[in-house]
Amino acid sequence: MESDKSVYAVVAIFAFLLLIVGGIITFFLLDTVLSGVKENSRNSSPPALIASLGRVLDKTSIGITSKILEKTIIPDSGNGGESGDTNVAICGNGVLEGDEECEGGGKPCGYGETCECDLNCKEVSIRGAYCGDGIVQNEFGETCDDQNSVNGDGCSSICKNEAIQTGDYCIDSDVTNVFADGKNTLIKGNVSLRLNGAVQDYFDDCSNNETKVNEFYCRNGKAENESIECMIGQVCEGGECKENIVQIEETKFISSNIPNGAIDARIPYQNGNPSLTFGWNSIILKFSGSVEGISIGNFSISGVGNDEPIEISGITRGSSQNDLVVIFNRQINPGNRAILKYIPENKEICIGYLPGDVNGDGVRSPNDMLAFIDALNGQKEFPIYSTDIDRSGIFTSADNLAFIDIGNGIYGDWNGKSLPPCKCTDDLQCSSGYVCNEGTCTELSGSPIFIDGEGLLVNLIRILKVI
């Protein structure tokens, strides 16, 4: 009984102490909260109260523990003590970041490899360990390294110890289970021959033939060679057959037979036969490589002027594999322009049609007469589509009559007329069904009711202009 009373007394004392300690802690927390509230009495909004509570927690064991965890788990970034920097470059993770010059580093250069990226992801050109470097690389299976690829001298061409032959011998380095006769075109091998005390080495080579290996092998104790054709898709390189890797250059647009900005100044139809009309209806584009992979989807075309929309009806290869003919669904009519765009390179060719515009400035004016006279006198040279007014195929004095006919209105009134610019500034410069969008005529899609707010506003403006 006495022992039980002692236990109860100890428990009571311990509980009393806990009560006192709890009271002190509670008083400290309340005092801190009230202090924080007083400090933020001028701003009693919820964010201020939350900030006060945060300061309280910061002074308690919770806040202290979080700081310890922060310093332990999140490493310092070195930026003024801030932690958690997620932009630290990691060499070898396959992502070029930070001050890295290359990726693929982060590991030593492998056996027999030439590396362009070191352990710090900096651009270098280093070679790893290899057979022939004079260092015995036991970890890579080398048992010797005499800095040559000769067999029969005690260290083979693959850095393996071998018994030195004292008599006559013939050793082929590229004999394998598959190529027991040594006629191995997939490995650049060598034949070491000792005959009558004289040692001679023969190395496989290409003998200036791109597809055949001059293969050395041993036969009846002597060195022989044979020209062996590589397999289809292989070429001879450094004395062995390797896969023929063809570097295909990206096909680039170079030029067109109708240059950008060109204006057709010739008659619009056959004299006396208005039903036989003229005008560009195709264009030939030249590329740096084959055009086989280029499709009609790589192009778009838009009209500038009051003409009906023009479209691309098809494409076909030209006279060479680098030429592509883009065919329009109709001719470009006088007084209008068309812009052909090669979408992959964002290249545009703007061509127009204005009868009598010899100098190609986009305006039919008296200056064209002066330019035509200069061309007749040989003082200036213009493209054939600017001076062959009668469309005979050559520029002669007879073109002067056709030029005068244009000036007299035989082919319509073109005096003082001008072409809209290649880059539009107003919807009325574009063909029907197109609107001027950032300087380019773009086709309207769908009903105006279902287009976006900006497109709807554009159409309303056009309607008001017509009214």
Image: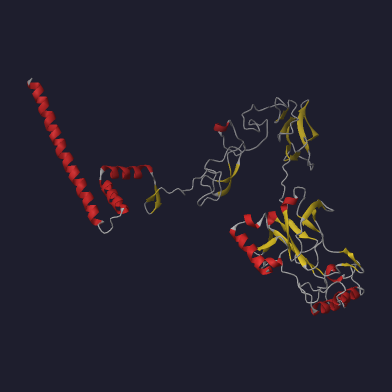
Question: Nearest the camera: 466 or 389?
Answer: 466
Instruction: Tell me if I can see residue 54 in this picture.
Output: yes
Residue 143 in the image: state x and y as whole percent: 58, 30
Question: Nearest the camera: 108 or 225?
Answer: 108
Seen at 28% across and 57% down, the residue is 43
Seen at 22% across and 55% down, the residue is 38
Q: Is residue 64 left or right of residue 252?
A: left
Seen at 78% across and 72% down, the residue is 360
Question: Nearest the camera: 241 or 146?
Answer: 241
Question: Nearest the camera: 25 or 443?
Answer: 443
Seen at 51% across and 52% down, the residue is 99
Q: Is residue 49 above or below residue 256?
A: above
Quadrant placement of the N terminus: top left
Image quarter for residue 44? bottom left
Q: Is residue 23 left or right of residue 113?
A: left
Image quarter for residue 212? top right
